[in-house]
Image (cartoon, grey):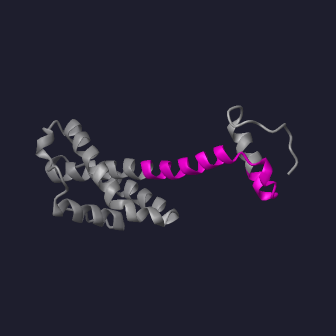
């Protein structure tokens, strides 16, 4: 790879640093690899995927809770949000299938977040929403994650 600029440090120009690191690895110049920062960035990628899954599951769970506890106020956008976010979770899991084994932990975190968010959005007391997912909620979540639109209670 022909460089158009001198090698950039990790803190000076991240994009150029990444290009330099990729070129060094591709060319087998392992002595030029900034191992500590490459390891940190690789670990950060997985952390980012985990965070993204929990964030998206929180949106799915919050809208499912609103559907369950305020069905008369349902909007098409609630169902669309569930559909889009569930699809995005499945896309992340398709790219990183090993994260699927962590889905119960992600779901537990997301549900705890979703209770708070649903209380804030609906105006209902947080105690309205069960502290742990009900079987009906878990069925609806599984249906949503499967790509089916029939996530009813």
Residue 115 to residue 89: above or below: above
Q: Residue at x 42, y 58 (%)?
A: 89
Give the overall secondary structure of the magenta segment. Answer: helix
The answer to whether residue 53 is seen in the rendering is: yes
The answer to whether residue 153 is seen in the rendering is: no
Query: In the shown orientation, is residue 143 left or right of residue 85?
Result: left
Quadrant assignment, res 87 = bottom left
Residue 144 percent location from the top left of the image: 31, 62
**Residue 46 is inside the magenta segment:** yes
* Closer to us: 133 or 139: 133
Residue 126 percent location from the top left of the image: 15, 40
**Residue 49 is inside the magenta segment:** yes
* Closer to us: 77 or 38: 38
Residue 105 percent location from the top left of the image: 33, 56
Q: Residue at x 81, y 54 (%)?
A: 29
Residue 94 to residue 16: above or below: below
The span shown in magenta is 22-51
Query: In the shown orientation, is residue 125 left or right of residue 90?
Result: left
Q: Residue at x 14, y 50 (%)?
A: 130
């Amino acid at each position: 790879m022909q460089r158009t600029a001198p090698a950039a440090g990790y803190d000076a120009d991240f994009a150029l640093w990444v290009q330099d690191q990729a070129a060094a690895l591709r060319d087998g110049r392992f002595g030029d690899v900034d191992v500590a920062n490459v390891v940190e960035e690789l670990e950060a990628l997985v952390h980012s995927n985990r965070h993204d899954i929990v964030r998206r599951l929180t949106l799915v769970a919050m809208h499912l809770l609103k559907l369950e506890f305020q069905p008369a106020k349902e909007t098409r956008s609630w169902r669309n949000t569930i559909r889009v976010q569930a699809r995005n979770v499945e896309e992340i899991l398709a790219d990183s299938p090993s994260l699927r084994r962590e889905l119960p932990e992600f779901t537990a975190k997301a549900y705890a977040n979703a209770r708070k968010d649903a209380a804030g959005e609906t105006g209902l007391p947080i105690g309205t929403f069960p502290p742990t997912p009900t079987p009906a909620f878990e069925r609806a979540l599984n249906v949503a994650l499967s790509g089916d639109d029939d996530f009813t209670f």
